[in-house]
Image (spheres, rainbow, N blue to C red):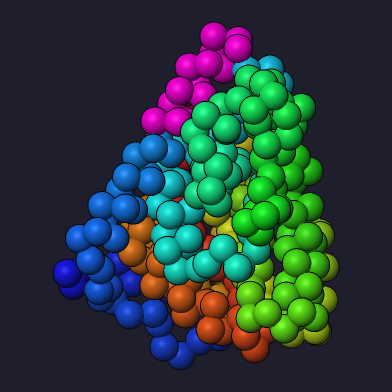
């Protein structure tokens, strides 16, 4: 099946954009839909459990943003590393855990990835190169640069994806990580999941520059419709090729359907 896209990519320091058409099979489409549907139902269930006070501590939900995770996984492999923020439940599922495993961790049960002691913000599956959710805003960007250094050192062909929100885009460690990544030409892709609100603060009230894909200054950037799984997939394929020469910055334009 050939799918034509309507919403263009926005580019920074790039001359050609990812393709506006995507070739996809029926089985691939059903697979993407099935995984996004499971993510959505899992997050709605987690929300219900949280409001019933069965989930202790925090519970940061990903519903509305599923196309980013599924599209990125479709354009990447488990040989690529992923590190993200505390909005991490869907990534744990996409990297090979089960809905039961995620909910066990949320509920403080032994069957969770951290035996129930990590909770919502600390999912982790190192055997499939998922290095977790991180509770400190923006801290994972530095870890992403380190994971990219490991890929380059091992010469294994992998890249690292470091995901963060629009609120974390103003954190100093992101710019430090971007600087060292550019100096060392690390295969890292910094991905801003722009869901329009940093906690409850709209992006225009919190950022002097809201073109997050340009924030890398000296590195190429791509803005993607984060609600379109195929747009994300095609952009990630291009970004992976670019990352062989050095870091890339992406912005996924999305929206979350629950509060922070």
Which residue occupies the foreground of this view, 115 or 201? 115
Residue 204 relative to residue 41: left or right? right
Q: Is residue 3 magenta?
A: no
| Residue 168 visible to the viewer | no
Residue 84 relative to residue 1: left or right? right
Q: Quadrant of residue 224?
A: bottom left
Please report the residue visible at 75 percent of the width from the left and 67 percent of the height from the top: 147
Most frequent secondary structure within the magenta stretch: helix
Please determine whether, in this image, residue 219 is positioned above or below residue 3.
Answer: below
Residue 22, how many percent across, how many down? 27, 73
Q: Magenta segment, which residues?
A: 41-54
Please report the residue visible at 43 percent of the width from the left and 26 percent of the height from the top: 44
Please report the residue visible at 31 percent of the width from the left and 53 percent of the height from the top: 31
Please determine whether, in this image, residue 47 is positioned above or below residue 230.
Answer: above
Please report the residue visible at 52 percent of the width from the left and 67 percent of the height from the top: 77
Q: Is residue 49 magenta?
A: yes
Which residue occupies the foreground of this view, 35 or 138? 35
Residue 22 relative to residue 194: left or right? left
Residue 64, how many percent across, how many down? 42, 41
Q: Residue furthest left?
A: 1
Which residue occupies the foreground of this view, 181 or 166? 181
Which quadrant of the rendered structure holds the N terminus?
bottom left
Which residue occupies the foreground of this view, 230 or 76? 76
Please determine whether, in this image, residue 80 is positioned above or below residue 227.
Answer: below
| Residue 46 visible to the viewer | yes
> Across the whole image, how many numbered discs are drawn on residues?
0
Residue 206, how many percent across, how many down? 65, 48
Residue 164, how many percent across, how many down? 64, 53
Which quadrant of the rendered structure holds the C terminus?
top right
């Amino acid at each position: 099946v050939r799918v034509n896209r309507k919403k263009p990519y926005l580019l920074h320091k790039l001359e050609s954009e990812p393709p506006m058409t995507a070739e996809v099979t029926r089985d691939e489409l059903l697979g993407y839909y099935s995984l996004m549907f499971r993510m959505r139902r899992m997050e709605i269930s987690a929300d219900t459990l949280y409001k019933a006070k069965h989930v202790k501590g925090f519970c940061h939900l990903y519903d509305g943003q599923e196309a980013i995770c599924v599209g990125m996984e479709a354009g990447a492999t488990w040989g690529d590393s992923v590190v993200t923020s505390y909005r991490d439940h869907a990534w744990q599922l996409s990297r090979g855990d089960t809905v039961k495993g995620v909910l066990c961790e949320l509920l403080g049960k032994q069957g969770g990835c951290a035996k129930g002691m990590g909770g919502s913000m600390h999912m982790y599956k190192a055997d499939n190169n998922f290095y977790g959710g991180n509770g400190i805003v923006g801290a994972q960007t530095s870890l992403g640069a380190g994971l990219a250094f490991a890929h380059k050192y091992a010469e294994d062909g992998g890249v690292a994806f470091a995901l963060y929100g629009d609120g974390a885009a103003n954190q100093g460690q992101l710019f430090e990580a971007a600087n060292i990544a550019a100096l060392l030409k690390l295969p890292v892709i910094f991905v801003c999941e722009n869901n329009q609100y940093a906690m409850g603060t709209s992006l225009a009230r919190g950022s002097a520059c809201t073109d997050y894909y340009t924030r890398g200054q000296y590195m190429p950037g791509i803005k993607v419709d984060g609600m379109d799984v195929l747009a994300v997939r095609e952009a990630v394929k291009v970004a992976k090729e670019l990352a062989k020469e050095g870091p890339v910055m992406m912005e996924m334009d999305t929206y979350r359907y629950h509060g922070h």
